[in-house]
Amino acid sequence: MSVGENIPHDSAVSHATGKSVFIDDRPEVHGEVFVGIVTSSVAHGKIKKIDMKEALHHPDVLGIFRGRDFHKNTWGTIVEEQPLLADPIVSYMDEPILLIAVNDRKSLSTVRKLIKIDIEEIPSIFTIDEAVAAQKFIHAANPFVQGNVEENLKRSPHRLKGVFECGGQEHFYLENQASVAYPLENGQLEIHSSSQHPTETQHLVAHALGLRYCDVVSIVKRLGGGFGGKESQAAPFAAYAALVASKLRRPARCVLSKDEDMKITGKRHPFKIHYEIGFDDAGLLIALRVQLYSDGGAYTDLSPSILERAMFHLDGAYYIPNIEIKAAACRTNNHSNTAFRGFGAPQGNMVIESIMEDIAVYLKKDSFSVRRANCYGIKERNVTPYGQWVENNQLPFLFDELYKISAYEKRSQEIKDFNLEYSGKVRGISMTATKFGIAFTARFLNQANALVNVHADGTVQVSTGATEMGQGVNTKLAQIVADTFGISTELVRVMPTSTEKNHNTSPTAASSGADLNGAAVLEAATKIKQRLLSLGTTLSWTDVVKKAYFERISLGEYAHFKTPGLDFDKEIGKGRAFNYFTMGTAVTEVEIDEYTGQSKVLRVDILMDLGRSINPGIDRGQVIGAFAQAMGWVTTEKLVYDKARHLLSHSPTTYKIPSLQDTPPILNVSFIENHTNTVNVHASKAVGEPPFVLGLSVWTAIKRAIGVRFAGKVIPLQSPATGEQILGLFKKMSKET
Ligand code: MTE
Ligand code: HPA
Ligand code: MOS
């Protein structure tokens, strides 16, 4: 037994003692060069002339490279359209244009000043509204339709129309984008990078340099955080290092500073949402019409899939009998937005949670009762807008149980009393839920392969396509193997991810790293176990392994896993998109200072169904981390740009992620017992992204609190709910009433 135990994270000690090796900790080898990036000074334009003569004379410069130096200068996970280096059109501010190879990275700032790039500006599009007006779209999704929206909106006793925007989010991983490329014999390359997707790195490097996949080995030991920001967007930086390494025949390292990383790389997609909802006197939803627009930025990247996941999660925990969801991703002259924990689900889910709060205010009801009444049912009212049934539905229980254990009713009364006594402060409470679909929505990505090698001394090495980014996938994989063999996890090492050992892997994303790779590992280990069992069961582990070796029985095994039963049809927008749902509820209580607009989270209670957790300690960390990250997204993490579209909030001093002081003083996290999720490895459930969605309760609680002073009025709150926005709303709404 080790599945289900709180085994510490396999890097816990080395992280805490600073001994973990990240990309830029790799010792510099003989002849190694550093690769610096020169970026665009305009958001949209045509490069007329690049003068690098003077720079090339600098004694520390070994070469300067342009887009045309690549064998192929375009890349893209879904659509191959993004230049590795803009040439000749630049499409966003700070887009990479040149690579400088230097002996010492300290020379870069001097060398950059010697380069003159002449760019003729082209008019830009920066906002979703401008893109919609100009009909500039990256992708328009096939709509999701259920029932008859038009007719049912008409017959609804109450209707609310609304528009709101939610902002982007910087990933703020601690390790910035980083790669080192080593040239090997016969033009082969070995790449080490901080990537969630080593296979994409391998493929892109091969395309960019005109190599075959078999000539590139891509290795990832670990990431200092990814959060989706290194799913697609790690690969170009590896291609930069690879280009320089292959041109100069020297090892080459490309590591971004925080400021560079924040300016160059894409972020969570901002969304603008238009909706109309119809409901009855009890607050029951009758019909919903929604149009989603996301800001995809300059290039396609993962925008179509992210938009689709937003559509899949618009319903949240609630049954909507008549619904029409239309969605389009806009093309703008912003950095190309990308995957970020939740992958569009938080943006989609925000629509319905916002509506729930609005209906409650409008009908002068508590929002819990409105949510509970609309919650997906067990036997009926349980079909999603895309036609998948909500099986194994724990939502009603999660709502009711958390209502009890968080003392919701009693606290609601206390909050009412507090708000009656005017103190310049106002409080709000709100419970929201998540029903997060687990599976890549691109069906082919739902596969994994694993290699398990048992050595003659009884120790085990495990290799899969999963990358360790702090989420603890290595620890879970080791537990699954140890559990299968009935040995301690101390005997199991999970090896660095390498395309040499695991081929054609999917990114570690969609929260399914442990699901997919865990299932493959379980199968490989089980095959070895079956061979060992044939030798008799009385021997100790080390003796049976030794015996197997001398009997010439294979102690290594490989397995491939694919998630069965997925059949979503994009054309008609119907089908089984997900293997199962991870569910949870959260109650947040906030306090707002009416004089400053500042909000404070006073208490959070979270209840989740993670099935039979493989490692409850690690899962707890994931829940708290995701919640805190979402709390930042909906409150203080505002991306600010100037007119020319320079990102002004490009460092920790100007971009405010939650700090220790923002930690809710009371934060209770519990899991329910559920052993019925037999469709996943060891009946566990994925945890990485679902609790991010629960952070929406901070935003809805703020909305609720502002509403206290304006009874019956729908609060037009946008996200993030910064102090500035809250104060502005108090002022504006006081004038109106
Ligand atoms: N946790 C840590 N510590 N660091 C990360 O970068 N990424 C999140 C989540 N938890 C992340 C994390 C995201 S976006 C995903 S999709 C999952 O982890 C990926 O890992 P998993 O599939 O193994 O859960
Ligand atoms: N989730 C996360 N990452 C992805 C997905 C998804 O559904 N599809 C492609 N990359
Ligand atoms: Mo996570 S956004 O699927 O990398």
Image (cartoon, rainbow, N blue to C red):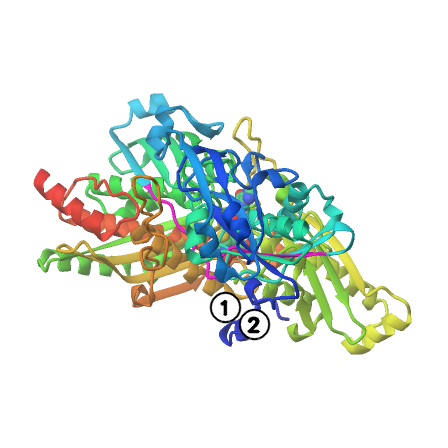
Q: What stretch is highlighted in magenta?
A: 166-183
Residue 217 badge: none
Q: Position of residue 614 (x, y in %)?
A: 57, 63
Q: How crowded is mark 2: few (under 14 residues within 10 Å), some or many (20 or more)?
A: some
Between marks 2 and 1, how big is the CA–CA gap?
A: 8 Å
Q: Position of residue 621 (x, y in %)?
A: 46, 65
Magenta-span inclusion, residue 191: no
Q: Quadrant of the C terminus?
A: top left
For residue 594, what is the image quadrant? bottom left
Q: In this view, does 202 lie to the left or right of 614?
A: right
Q: Is residue 21 above or below residue 423?
A: below
For residue 409, what is the image quadrant? bottom left
Asked whether 595 or 359 is in front, the reply is 595
Q: Is residue 541 left or right of residue 129?
A: right
Tell me, yes or no, whether the two marked residues, 2 and 1, touch with CB atoms within 8 Å: yes
Question: Which residue is rendered at x = 23% and y = 40% of the image?
Answer: 716
The image quadrant in which ligand 2 is located: top right
Amino acid type of disc 2?
Answer: Ile
User: Which of pointers 2 and 1 lies earlier in the amino acid sequence?
Assistant: 2
Q: How crowded is mark 1: few (under 14 residues within 10 Å), some or many (20 or more)?
A: some
Q: In which quarter of the image is the N terminus?
A: bottom right
